[in-house]
Amino acid sequence: MRIITNLRMQLGFSLIEALVALIVLSVGMLGIAALYGQGLSAARTALYRTIAVYLAAEMADRIRANRLARAGYDAAGAPNACGPGGGTDCTPAQLAASDKLVWSTLVGRELPGGVGTVVFTPGTPPTYTITVRWQDVTGAAQYRIAPQIPAL
């Protein structure tokens, strides 16, 4: 009789062990899910930063190709139909305004809440501060370069 009594007392113990194991496993899975979410957020941030670096470098290349415009890149963009396929002979200032409009549109399209600015600082050599701002997962973010591009 004693053996049967001891067996009955231990029957519920394995159920408690199974419940504890299920809780531990659930907490571990929630941790893995949170880590996966953090990884996705970091990947999105890295993608936006890569796009911003590319866009800033593109504007620097546009300035290098049109060095005579100088302060023309500091002004607002304008649709002058300059550039490839435009068929219009443009002054350096008109090309700069067209470049700025195309680039600003591209920044706004490629980055969430994206805004691009160019500030010209005369000097020897002149400096162009190119800033790209956007809304990131963690809040407002920006990337800035200041290439010194001498006039020809």
Image: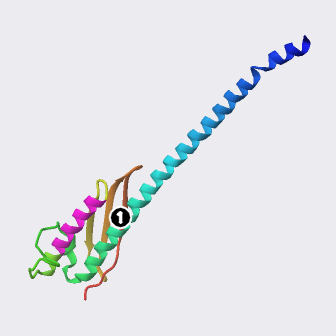
Residue at 81% from the left image edge and 16% from the top image edge: 9
Quadrant of image for the C terminus: bottom left
Magenta stretch containing residue 104, yes or no? yes
Estimate the x, y position of residue 79 in percent, counting from the top left.
Answer: 12, 68
**Looking at numbered disc 1 in the image, what kind of residue is underneath it?**
Ala
The colour scheme used to paint the residues is rainbow
Q: What residue is disc 1 on?
A: 52
Residue 75 vs 114, above or below: the answer is below
Residue at 11% from the left image edge and 73% from the top image edge: 81
Which range of residues does the magenta coloring cover? 96-110
Quadrant of image for the N terminus: top right
Residue at 65% from the left image edge and 32% from the top image edge: 22
Q: In which quarter of the image is residue 66?
A: bottom left
Residue at 77% from the left image edge and 20% from the top image edge: 11
* Residue with the most extreme top position: 1
Asked whether residue 128 appears in the rendered view, the answer is no
Q: Quadrant of residue 59?
A: bottom left
Magenta stretch containing residue 107, yes or no? yes
Q: Main secondary structure of the magenta part?
A: helix
* Residue with the most extreme right position: 2
Estimate the x, y position of residue 10 in percent, counting from the top left.
Answer: 80, 20
Estimate the x, y position of residue 102 in percent, counting from the top left.
Answer: 20, 68
Q: Residues within 10 Å of mark 1 (few under 14, many from 20)?
A: many
Residue 66 vs 38, above or below: the answer is below
Residue 111 vs 93, above or below: the answer is above
Which sits in the foreground, 26 or 93?
26
Q: Is mark 1 on a helix, strand or loop?
A: helix
Which sits in the foreground, 22 or 38?
22
